[in-house]
Image (spheres, rainbow, N blue to C red):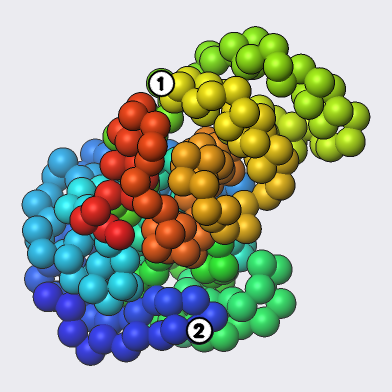
Amino acid sequence: MLHDIEQHKTPFPYFTAKLNSGLCEQLGSLARLDLDWQRHDSFYHCWIAHAAEHIRLPQELPGAVAALLDLPLTDAMQLTIQRMGPGDHALPHTDRPLLGFEAARLVVQLTPDWSLADGGLFAVHPDSEGTRTTRTREPLFASVVGFGMRLASHHSVRPVHTHRLTAVVHFWHHANTPALHAQVRDLLEGASFAALPASLDATLTEAEAEHSEEETLRAGTVALLLTQWGADELSVERGYRAGLEPWTGCSGDTDIDLARWAAKLWLDCFDIDAWEEAAARVGHSRLGPAKAFRALAFPPSAV
């Protein structure tokens, strides 16, 4: 299915390969269907349509991509068809995954008879501004690029001069699934800091005078999670103080670390590199309700 594979470790893990040409012909034919095309004109200038219901993707594809990227991916897949016309392009970006979003992509080039004058090269950058380019990949028919959506996975698409057609297969990390999103949403959506214990009032007042709104929001979210999980008041206060600092790794207190991780997912994004560090250190939670979150955020099948 995938052949002529080249794996790269810098500036982030990704691979290039060729995909079965017959499958690429099927994918290319989807663009001729009456799809619901949506125009995007932000950092990414193109037309995008969902098309998973129109084709059966190979079931071995998630496993192949997971092995090449060394990521624990689920079997779930989504498919979009993306087309660019003259002037369309994508600025340097990382596609960092939010809570419950995809964590890896396989970009399949479907433009027949592409030439260098057509533009639309896929570029890999070591910096967020794209001031330097590590490599470029010509969008030749049936060529692919696969990558995990890490905070440092900066890439772009050079301006297109004629047209460029791609299929993008989207994959989910075992520890950032829609089910995890639903659980965290149920815990935090509509929740009020008024539920925090009154013993925390002095700490809250002190923190609000010395820390930014972003920092106190994160700390309050950590404390709120611990409260809902049934932690004692001392643990809630310790969690609040720990939450005032950005995530730099596990502290060693499993329940507080789980609450800090849930707050990071809710307020920021899913950081694959941070998850890999945390997964090696987060043990069994002492809080019964927190075990349900841990089972989804650090599943045994992925750790």
Mark 1 surroundings within 10 Å by alpha-carbon count, few (fewer than 14), some (14 through 19), many (20 or more): few
Tell which circle, 1 or 2, labels the residue nearer the N-terminal end.
Answer: 2
What's the residue type where badge 2 is placed? Thr
Q: CB under 8 Å between callouts 1 and 2?
A: no
Q: Residue at x 47, y 64 (%)?
A: 277
Determine the image quadrant of residue 16: bottom left
Q: Which residue is mark 1?
A: 186
Determine the image quadrant of residue 60: bottom left
Left or right: residue 2 compared with residue 224: left
Left or right: residue 25 compared with residue 229: left
Q: Residue at x 78, y 26 (%)?
A: 203
Q: Quadrant of the N terminus?
A: bottom left
Q: Residue at x 47, y 39 (%)?
A: 255
Q: Residue at x 68, y 49 (%)?
A: 246
Q: Nearer the viewer, residue 148 or 297?
A: 297
Residue 162 x, y percent position in the rendering: 46, 67
Q: Is residue 165 above or below residue 202?
A: below
For the residues marked 1 and 2, what is the alpha-carbon distance in whole angstroms? 38 Å
Residue 82 visible in the current orientation: no
Mark 2 surroundings within 10 Å by alpha-carbon count, few (fewer than 14), some (14 through 19), many (20 or more): few
Q: Secondary structure at mark 2?
A: loop
What's the residue type where badge 1 is placed? Asp
Q: Is residue 119 above or below residue 150?
A: below
Residue 55 x, y percent position in the rendering: 12, 50
Q: Is residue 112 above or below residue 6?
A: above
Q: Secondary structure at mark 1?
A: helix
Q: Which residue is mark 2?
A: 10
Q: Quadrant of the C terminus?
A: bottom left
Residue furthest out toward the right: 209
